[in-house]
Image: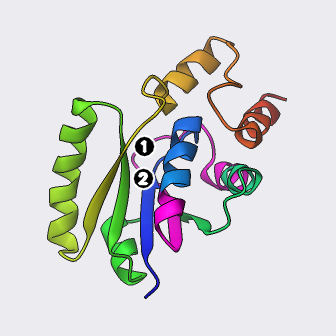
């Protein structure tokens, strides 16, 4: 049986921490669906389709071949259910992440009772999309916090 997992997030932007979680998930599952969630009520810093292309390039450059990136405007649990995905991947940096994720997990279980959560411990606990955006807004070098393809995309947006 083909084991599939979904790894959702805003990925605004996609960081090395996210790539680490993708690498871990891809080692355990036959297929991993990385889903960029688009929430119409939240303004993105980086355009979802542009980040998607950069993520695909970064994942390919990392030598990972069983991952597909999607942009989705809707409920993650419904995406998982409609694609027959039973496992949701989340990365945890600390206990605050755990508490936050558990609340979301309860809601997703109401929508799709068949979904199971798998948590991976983050290796880069200080790295977050918010931190990267903050550093970038102050014109600091972010190249060591994001994959090279994502860095190239972000730099190209500045031109």
The residue lying furthest to the bottom in this view is: 1
- Position of residue 80 relative to residue 121, above or below, is below
| Snapshot quadrant of residue 147 | top right
Boundaries of the magenta span: 25-54
Residue located 18% across and 48% down the image: 102
Q: Is residue 118 magenta?
A: no
**Label 2: which secondary element:** loop
Residue located 40% across and 73% down the image: 79
Left or right: where 118 falls relative to 67: left
Q: Is residue 47 magenta?
A: yes
**Label 1: which secondary element:** loop
Q: Nearer the viewer, residue 159 or 32?
A: 32
* Residue 155: x %, y % from top left: 78, 30
Q: Answer whether residue 112 is visible to the viewer in this image.
A: yes
Which residue lies under the disc numbered 1?
Answer: 42
Left or right: where 6 falls relative to 119: right
Question: Which numbered disc covers residue 39?
Answer: 2
> How many residues crowd mark 1 within 10 Å: few (<14), some (14–19), many (20+)?
few
Q: Nearer the viewer, residue 29 or 16?
A: 29
């Amino acid at each position: 049986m083909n084991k599939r997992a979904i790894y959702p997030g805003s990925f605004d932007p996609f960081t090395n921490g996210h790539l680490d979680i993708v690498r871990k998930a891809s080692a355990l599952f036959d297929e991993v669906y990385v889903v960029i969630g688009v929430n119409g009520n939240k303004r993105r810093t980086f355009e979802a389709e542009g980040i998607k292309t950069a993520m695909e390039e970064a994942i390919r450059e990392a030598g990972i071949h069983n991952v597909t990136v999607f942009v989705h405007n809707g409920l993650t649990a419904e995406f998982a259910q409609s694609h027959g995905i039973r496992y949701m991947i989340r990365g945890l940096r600390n206990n605050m992440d755990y508490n936050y994720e558990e609340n979301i997990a309860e809601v997703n279980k109401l929508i799709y009772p068949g979904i199971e959560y798998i948590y991976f411990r983050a290796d880069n606990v200080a790295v977050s999309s918010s931190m990267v955006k903050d550093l970038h807004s102050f014109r600091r070098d972010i190249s060591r916090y994001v994959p090279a393809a994502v860095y190239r995309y972000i730099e190209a947006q500045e031109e």
